[in-house]
Amino acid sequence: MYSLSNWLRSSHGPDADPLGSCVLYIYPCVCGINNRKRRGEGKPETFNFLGFTHICIKKRSNGMYTVLRQTIRKRLQAKLNAVKAELRRRMHEPIPEQGKWLQAVVRGHNRYYGVPMNRNALWLFRFQVGRLWHRALSRRSQNGRVLWERMRRLINRWLPLPTDCHPYPLRRMGVIT
């Protein structure tokens, strides 16, 4: 029989700690938020997983606890830097080709990170991509500047608006309680 500790050693090296992958209690029914307050502990831990920072928060609408998933800042910055480098490389391509490529980039970002309560990060990504695109188009020639009025039209035409592609499971399955 192959045990978990043997698997960890074989996949992560001989000095892998079997308790290194600990369970984080983020749900209030498990960790008891109110009990944490009585014990003098702070908020539950946050952790990064699959490109999201998971945070336990209390909703303003009904006072219940939920898990907030936000885009990891490092991932957002890394993707924007990659877009910036690629825009620099594609600077002299026609605007429709650039627009189609940026549309695919923003649409893919929205589809992966489009979870409830992460819309601000999606709007930020779209805005920053538009800003980088404006900068690339303005650097195509010495005396050519793209006015923001034209740039807004290009952004509205080519960059899709953020949407929640992955709603809450109860809403997604149409469950009525």
Image (cartoon, rainbow, N blue to C red):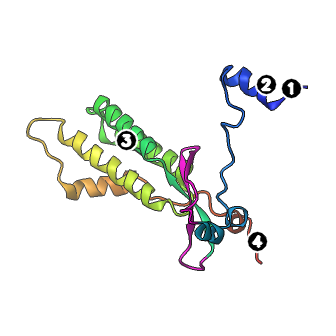
- Earlier sequence position, callout 2 versus callout 4: 2
To which residue does mark 2 refer? 6
Q: CA distance from mark 3 to mark 4?
A: 38 Å
Which residue is situated farthest in the left direction here? Answer: 143
What amino acid is at disc 3? Answer: Leu
- Earlier sequence position, callout 4 versus callout 1: 1
Please provide percent x and percent y for residue 173.
74, 65
Magenta span of residues = 40-63
Please provide percent x and percent y for residue 123.
40, 58
Give the position of the N terminus as an image quadrant. Answer: top right
Q: CA distance from mark 2 to mark 4?
A: 42 Å
> Badge 1 local density, few (<14 within 10 Å), some, or many (20+)?
few
Q: Which of 30 and 63 lies nearest the eye of the viewer?
A: 30
Tag 3 near tag 4, CB within 8 Å = no
Tag 3 near tag 2, CB within 8 Å = no
Q: Which of 136 and 1 lies nearest the eye of the viewer?
A: 1
**SS at mark 1 in the image:** loop
Residue 80 image label: 3
What amino acid is at disc 4? Answer: Val
To which residue does mark 1 refer? 2
Residue 175 image label: 4
Tag 1 near tag 2, CB within 8 Å = yes
Is 56 within the magenta? yes
- Asked whether the viewer can see residue 100, the reply is no
What amino acid is at disc 2? Answer: Asn
In the image, is 174 to the left or to the right of 58?
right
